[in-house]
Image (cartoon, helix red, strand yellow):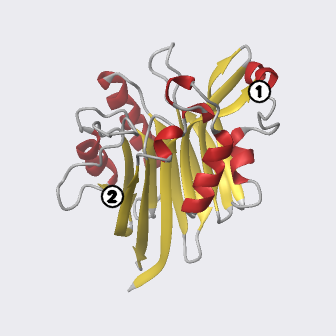
Amino acid sequence: MKMPALHVATYNIHKGFSQFNRRMMVHELRERLRHLNPDIVFLQEVQGLHLQHAENHADWPPAPQHEFLADDHWLDSAYGRNMIYDHGHHGNAILSRFPILHSHNQDVTHLHFEKRGLLHCRIQLPETVAHCVCVHLSLFGHSRRRQMEALADYLDREADPQAPLIIAGDFNDWRNRAGDQLARRLGLSEAFSCPRGIPARSFPAALPMFRLDRIYLRGFAVHRTEIHHGPPWSAISDHAALSAHLTRHAP
């Protein structure tokens, strides 16, 4: 028996700027996300605060980007601050149409110059509670492997092994090695990998060549997937957005 449908998306929003930081695009980003209208959105490179941008751009939102994006459309949002500097900070965020019962940002930094965190939320879906984790992993393979092991260790402690689980974000997994590691430790499958067995191309957004962004699942069946690239998406960020329409099998 299948449970109600769920629409999820993941997007590295490049701090609200177009590729090469040419234009501020956070307002266009908000309209695109609302048009796409997912139930749960996993966002990376979300600007929580940037004093210089606030001074230099008259239409810079007064609220943190996750709050600005969620306002009057998504019921709840959570933000995990990872990279902190004198004039601000950025990190990961989750926007949800359903109540976020609890959120926690787990530090998985391996290299001191590359701060990374895993934003974990427990979200009350209509029929169950799902664990949702937004990730943005290291540019370096050895660090990514350590971060994925840290992710699996954390979820072993915090989540029942049978609980519905979605892990999405920018994995920077150029060599497509994350799938085996996450399948072995957490019983996950990647939404775009069937039937070809490889994730979607998502970078650069204008003409995707590299398979960096992922949606990993446990306890859900994939009904349909989409890669949102080319205009107008490629004017908003250097990554394509990915979305998946899911159904959950009753336990």
Q: Residue at x 61, y 29 (%)?
A: 23
Residue type at numbered disc 2: Ala
Mark 2 residue element:
loop
Name above or below for residue 144 compared with residue 197: above
The residue where tag 1 is placed is: 57
Q: Percent from the top left, x then y, of residue 28?
A: 63, 46
**64 to 127, vertically: above or below:** above
Q: CA distance from mark 2 to mark 1?
A: 38 Å
User: Could you tell me which quadrant the C terminus lies in?
Assistant: bottom left
Tell me the kind of residue under disc 1. His
Label 1 crowd bin: few (<14), some (14–19), many (20+), radius 10 Å: few
The label on residue 237 is none
The residue tagged 2 is 191
Q: Do tag 2 and tag 1 residues touch (Cβ < 8 Å)?
A: no
Residue 198, how many percent across, how many down? 21, 49
Residue placed furthest toward the front: 231
